[in-house]
Structures are given as structure tokens and as C-alpha cells.
């Protein structure tokens, strides 16, 4: 297996791609840090601070509310909000004195059926805030369905059941950086997936390009299958390596500037209707697994396709189409709901962290009900296992053709 790894790393184009990946990872992360944060010095100030300096201002503001989101505190926010004559002035001031709290109230009450979309100024109190959040989840499902996203009666019921399990009360804290991180992760995942496709397809033709298949064809079938197995494992390890190199570089740069604030706080602080009963840190880790396993499975399928077609360029084109087309089919809505739900688990869609955090789709696996992220992990593992089984057989066959 070490010999096969050396084959991959020894290629000039691979070294170039790794270099480009590192540069792109650093560039994306630094750009996000430079342009992803902004804050006004005060409610009455027009001076907007951006970049890492804004992070310090925002953290300082959150320090006064860095605790549990209780009904008592929410009622104080409502009272403070109403002390201003205009909504614009109220929001600006409340966002500074009680950062994040206005967004929570708007998220639950701005579209609730029972409150007819009341603004904060219209609210008497937030005594039923956590119960009203469940109503907001129901309404969000209905609104998504109006936009041609179908949910079966079972799915709606399961989604509400899952939403009720969310741990409360929420723990407030500086969390602006998590939203930025979740929008940044898909860009890196897609970059790594494309690199994985290119390297894997090229690696499938390594022996043929160097006429090594003539020598290997003299080996017994069990030996050539063992070589194929070593290639599959080497490829999986290599893709895992470049994935985590990219993630470690990006995470180190990012968290060195933002810190780990709100790691243990509910993701609902930022995504109020989310079904995921995870903290911000938990979502980061689970989607890291989604990204890793998806990129590895993409690489193995690319390698497998290269062995099946035995034409590098054709395999590259087909693999790119397999990567992109499912998302297009979902977008234009020309497939049935059953197929659509399966396509939602494909990597390009699964990479979109924020979209999946707010997804209400539930997959029934018999004994358990899982959300999109968990479903993608299961599918990626299944695809990887099948690829590991088929690659040695196809490699052995190709050597003899």
C-alpha cells in the first residue's frame, strides 16, 4: 500500500494540485475573515468596523448576555425594544445591548400562525417562546411545501417530534463566526471533491499508461486482486490525508482569529427552526464527517469508473456529470419525490451545510429516523464499501485485457 501511495504522490500534477489546494484553502479562509465580519461602533454611529477588529467588538457585546436564554431575559428585550419610537432604532440598539436576542424573537414570532406574524413591538411577552418555536417549525414546513418541496404526512409528524427533542433553554454566546464557517466549508468540500475526481480517474490508468499491465498480467488472479485492493486503500488514505490537511489549515487560521465561542451552544441560536439537536461545534464535526466520507466515496467511485470505462477523459466527463447533474434535477424539479429525497443525499447537495441545517426531510431506516446529514454519511459509507469490494476484481480483469 505504501508503494501505491508513493505512485500517487510522485506524480507532478498531484503535487501541483496539492499546492493549489493549500493556496486556495488559505485564500478562502483569509477572505472570509476579512470580509465576513462587520459591526457599528454604537447604535448612533455610522462608522462600520470590518474584519478581525469587528470580532473583538462583537465578542465584547455578547459578554453581557453570555448565558441561558430564559423567558425573563426575552421579556426584558421586548420591554427595551418598545422603549424606542421606531423599529429601526429599536433593532439597532437591542442588537448592541442584547446581541442575538432580537433575531431569536423575530425567528419565532415574525411568521407564527397564532400571532399572525407579529413584530416584537406587538408582543406582550415571550412566556411561551420555546413552545412557540415548535409552531414556527410547523409554519416553516408549510412554507417550504408551498415552494414545491413535498413532505409526506409521516415526514411532517417525524420532523415535529424531532424538533420537540431540542435541548432548552438555549445558551447564548458569540456565534457570528459559525454562520461564516458553515458558508465557507462547502467551497472547500467542492474543491477537494474536484481534486479527488481528477486524481482518482488518472490513477485508475496508471499501469496502462506505463505499460506495467504487461508485467502484471503474468501474475495469478489473487495477486493482481491484492494489488487492486492496495490501490483502493492507498487512494482512500491519500484523499483522507489531503482532506484533513485542508481542514486543519482552514480551521487553524479561522479559530485562531475567532476563538471557539458558542461551541457548546444550540445551533438554533442562529437557525431557530433547525431540527438538529446539536451545538454549533457538533454541527461542525458532523458536517466535517459528511465532507470527508463524501469526498472519499467520490474518489473511489471515480477510480471505479475509470476501471470500467478504461478511457480517462470519458470517465472524467461522466464523473463530473454525476457530481453536478443530481443538484440540477433537484433544482428544476423534474423527478419524483422518492428519487428527489435520495438525490438530496448526494455529495454536492450534502456539502451545503446551511441548507441541510434547515432541511426538514426525515429518512426512515426502519428502527431509526435520520436527518439529511446522517443519511449522507450512511450512503457514503455504503458506496465506499461497495467500491472497495469491486475495485480489486475490476483491476484484475483490466490487467488481463
Image (cartoon, helix red, strand yellow):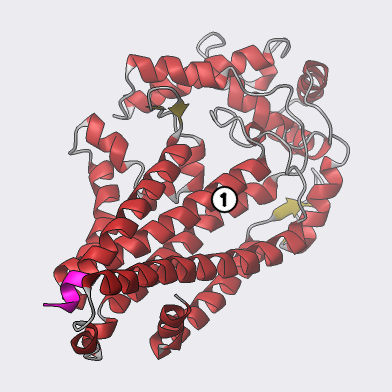
* 217 versus 201 height, above or below: below
Percent of width and height locating residue 88: 68, 34
Q: Is residue 320 visible?
A: no
Magenta stretch mostly in which secondary structure?
Answer: helix
Q: Residues within 10 Å of mark 1 (few under 14, many from 20)?
A: many
Residue placed furthest toward the right: 64
Q: Give the image quarter of residue 98.
A: top right
Q: Quadrant of the C terminus?
A: bottom left
In the rendered image, residue 124 lying in the magenta stretch gets the answer no
Percent of width and height locating residue 131: 63, 12
Q: Is residue 71 visible?
A: yes
Percent of width and height locating residue 261: 77, 47
* 92 versus 32 height, above or below: above
Percent of width and height locating residue 90: 74, 31
Q: Nearer the viewer, residue 334 or 74?
A: 334
**Quick check: 125 left or right of 184?**
right
Where disc 1 sits, the SS reads: helix
**Quick check: 50 left or right of 242?**
right
* Residue at 80% over, 19% down: 79
Q: Tell me which segment is drawn in magenta.
A: 396-401
**Residue at the disc numbered 1:** 182
**Quick check: 284 left or right of 332?**
right
* Residue at 19% over, 32% down: 336
Q: Nearer the viewer, residue 150 or 369?
A: 369
* Residue at 23% over, 60% down: 321
Q: Nearer the viewer, residue 358 or 106?
A: 358
Residue placed furthest toward the left: 401
Q: Give the image quarter of residue 108.
A: top right
* Residue at 77% over, 21% down: 74
**Quick check: 187 left or right of 84?**
left
Amino acid at each position: 500500500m505504501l508503494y501505491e501511495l508513493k505512485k500517487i504522490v510522485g506524480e507532478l500534477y498531484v503535487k501541483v494540485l496539492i499546492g493549489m489546494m493549500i493556496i486556495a484553502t488559505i485564500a478562502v479562509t483569509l477572505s472570509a475573515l476579512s470580509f465576513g465580519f462587520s459591526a457599528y461602533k454604537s447604535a448612533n454611529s455610522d462608522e462600520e468596523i470590518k474584519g478581525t477588529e469587528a470580532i473583538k467588538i462583537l465578542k465584547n457585546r455578547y459578554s453581557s448576555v453570555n448565558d441561558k436564554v430564559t423567558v425573563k431575559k426575552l421579556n426584558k428585550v421586548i420591554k427595551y425594544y418598545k422603549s424606542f419610537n421606531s423599529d429601526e432604532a429599536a433593532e439597532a440598539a437591542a442588537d448592541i445591548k442584547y446581541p442575538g436576542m432580537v433575531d431569536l424573537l423575530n425567528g419565532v414570532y415574525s411568521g407564527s400562525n397564532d400571532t399572525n406574524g407579529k413584530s416584537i413591538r406587538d408582543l406582550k411577552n415571550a412566556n411561551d417562546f420555546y413552545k412557540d418555536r415548535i409552531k414556527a417549525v410547523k409554519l416553516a414546513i408549510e412554507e417550504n411545501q408551498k415552494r414545491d418541496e413535498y413532505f409526506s404526512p409521516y415526514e411532517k409528524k417525524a420532523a415535529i417530534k424531532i424538533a420537540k427533542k431540542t435541548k432548552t433553554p438555549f445558551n447564548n454566546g458569540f456565534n457570528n463566526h459559525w454562520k461564516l464557517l458553515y458558508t465557507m466549508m462547502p467551497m472547500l468540500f467542492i474543491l477537494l471533491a474536484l481534486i479527488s475526481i481528477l486524481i482518482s480517474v488518472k490513477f485508475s490508468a496508471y499501469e496502462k499508461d506505463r505499460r506495467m499491465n504487461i508485467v502484471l498480467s503474468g501474475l495469478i488472479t489473487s495477486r493482481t486482486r491484492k494489488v487492486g485492493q492496495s490501490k483502493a486503500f492507498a487512494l482512500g488514505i491519500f484523499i483522507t490525508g489531503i482532506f484533513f490537511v485542508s481542514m486543519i489549515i482552514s480551521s487553524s487560521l479561522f479559530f485562531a482569529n475567532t476563538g471557539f465561542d458558542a461551541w457548546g451552544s444550540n445551533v438554533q441560536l442562529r437557525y431557530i427552526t433547525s431540527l438538529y439537536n446539536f451545538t454549533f461545534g457538533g454541527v461542525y464535526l458532523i458536517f466535517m464527517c459528511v465532507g470527508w466520507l463524501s469526498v472519499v466515496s467520490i474518489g473511489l467511485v471515480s477510480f471505479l469508473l475509470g476501471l470500467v470505462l478504461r478511457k480517462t477523459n470519458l470517465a472524467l466527463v461522466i464523473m463530473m456529470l454525476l457530481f453536478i447533474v443530481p443538484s440540477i434535477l433537484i433544482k428544476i424539479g423534474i423527478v419524483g419525490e422518492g428519487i428527489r429525497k435520495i438525490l438530496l443525499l448526494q455529495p454536492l447537495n450534502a456539502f451545503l451545510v446551511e441548507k441541510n441545517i434547515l432541511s426538514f426531510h426525515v429518512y426512515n431506516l426502519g428502527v431509526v429516523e435520520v436527518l439529511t446529514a446522517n443519511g449522507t454519511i450512511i450512503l457514503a459509507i455504503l458506496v465506499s464499501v461497495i467500491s472497495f469490494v469491486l475495485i480489486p476484481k475490476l483491476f484484475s480483469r483490466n490487467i488481463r485485457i
